[in-house]
Image (cartoon, grey):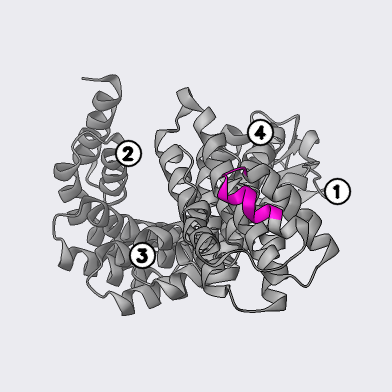
Amino acid sequence: MKQYYFKGVFALILASFVLQGYQCGSPEFTGAKVHMQQKNFKEAIRLLEIEVQKNPANEEAWYLLGGLKADERDYEGMNKAFGEALKLSNLHAGEIRAIRYNNWGQNLNAGVSYLERASADSAEYFEKSIQAFQNAITAWPDTGMTHKYLGYAYNNKGDLANALTNYMKAWEMDGDVEAVKRAGRIYVVRGEEHKNKFESANAEKLKRWKTLEDVKKMSNKADVMKALGAPDNIKKGPRNTKKEEWSYASYKLTVAVDGDKVTGRSFSAPYNAQIDSTEYFLGQKEYSKAVELLEKAVEKDPKDSETLTVLLRAYIESNRIQEAIKAFQLAIKNEPGNKVNHYILGVLYRQVGRFDDAIAEFRQTLVIDPEDADATFDLGATYYNWGVDIIKKAEEKGEQTEAFRAKFEAALPYMEKVTQLKKDDPQIWETLGTIYARLGQQEKALNAFDQADKIRKGN
């Protein structure tokens, strides 16, 4: 239903015309007032448009024309007429502001109402909502809040480009924190889209590249055979030795082995996986933009754990782990009792090999919540990873070490506890079995592996 706010206001003005009589003016201006009194508003608009062309200094004519344009929902015409009136005088500044505000409010409320009714089955309400918010913006362009709501409408419709544009306007105009959070999330989504395209287009090439990177770190020939398959050619070493050279033509790779051990790797030419990285770098740009905006959001609202988690994702995807660590160190300073932040910081520390720091954060998580299954598992897993890291470094140097045992023994009680908290997770049982095996507890290892196998088979 149309609401003629301005025409209601003019009922009072027209009453004064009747009591006081019309002042002398041009035939068009006088005629416009008469037609307004008679509620013939279209003719009144026509005459006022003629009047302002003939007499552009007539502030009242501009004001009346702007009000009638508002009631006709011609908001661009309203703005032009009111703008001209205000250039000439502030006589009607209060009324103009009230009319603009009223039309803005009506359209904003209509937009919200349409948006609440919109769904996949009633998509036309998205369009109605968008149009109403656009009308509200035209009626009162000076507030960023309407752009935020327009962003919501576009976002829910699935038009992320227009949603992003309006969220950014809301942020730039009003510093709207919710708007910049939403904008940051859109950049993360767009980064994910590029990442998925990159991985899909290069799936087999990436698999081969990753396999080769893994082989570069392998010290056991059986692992190389499992990863690359049988070599294209095997060149035997000197008699009475177990030395061999395995050639893999497609990788231009030669692997030197001695008995069960890998003793060297060499390439006849650099391996070119021929990966098209276009989508990858486009994704990196999107993630970087997400980081820029979400950092601002977290600065404004440091206790918003949901936004902090989205920022974490953007950091990780853009390979900015150190910045992620700093962000969660600050988050813990702001909320020392937030177990999630302690847990995430622990994961980040472990990712960069800061095992002591990771363990401290997981322990703090368990101080806050002693039954947190994820923190219990990751505390044990960190000790386990630390032990594995010790083994790998020793093998790379051709050394033997027992230093890993202390780390595996420290991992054991946590992994045993987590099997009670997550009884149906085969990965946990397999990790526990591996630790038992490394510690020489073969019977317990077999039982753990058997339990993992039963879970996978649904027994």
Q: CA distance from mark 1 to mark 2?
A: 39 Å
Give the residue type at disc 4.
Ser
Q: Position of residue 177 (x, y in %)?
A: 46, 66
Q: Which residue lies under the disc numbered 3?
A: 304
Closer mark to the observer between disc 1 and disc 4: 4
Q: Is residue 269 above or below residue 200?
A: below
In the image, residue 281 lies in the stretch drawn in magenta: no
Q: What residue is pinned by disc 2?
A: 427
- SS under mark 2: helix
What's the distance in space between the residues labelled 4 and 2, CA to CA? 27 Å
Amino acid under disc 1: Ala
The residues colored magenta run 31-40
- Discs 1/3, front: 3
In primary-sequence order, the first of circles 1 and 4 is: 4
Q: Count all numbered tags in the image, as a single digit.
A: 4
In the rendered image, is residue 218 in sight? no
Q: Mark 1 and 2 residues: CB-CB less than 8 Å, in contact?
A: no
Instruction: Name above or below for residue 234 compared with residue 59.
Output: above
**In the picture provided, is 294 more to the left or to the right than 59?**
left
Percent x, y of residue 195: 63, 44
Numbered disc in front, either 3 or 4: 3
Q: Quadrant of residue 140?
A: bottom right
Marks 3 and 4, how far apart at CA: 34 Å
Front-most of 225 and 353?
353
Counting residues from the N terminus, which is met first, the one under dot 1 or under dot 3? 1
Looking at the rendered structure, the kind of residue marked 2 is Gln
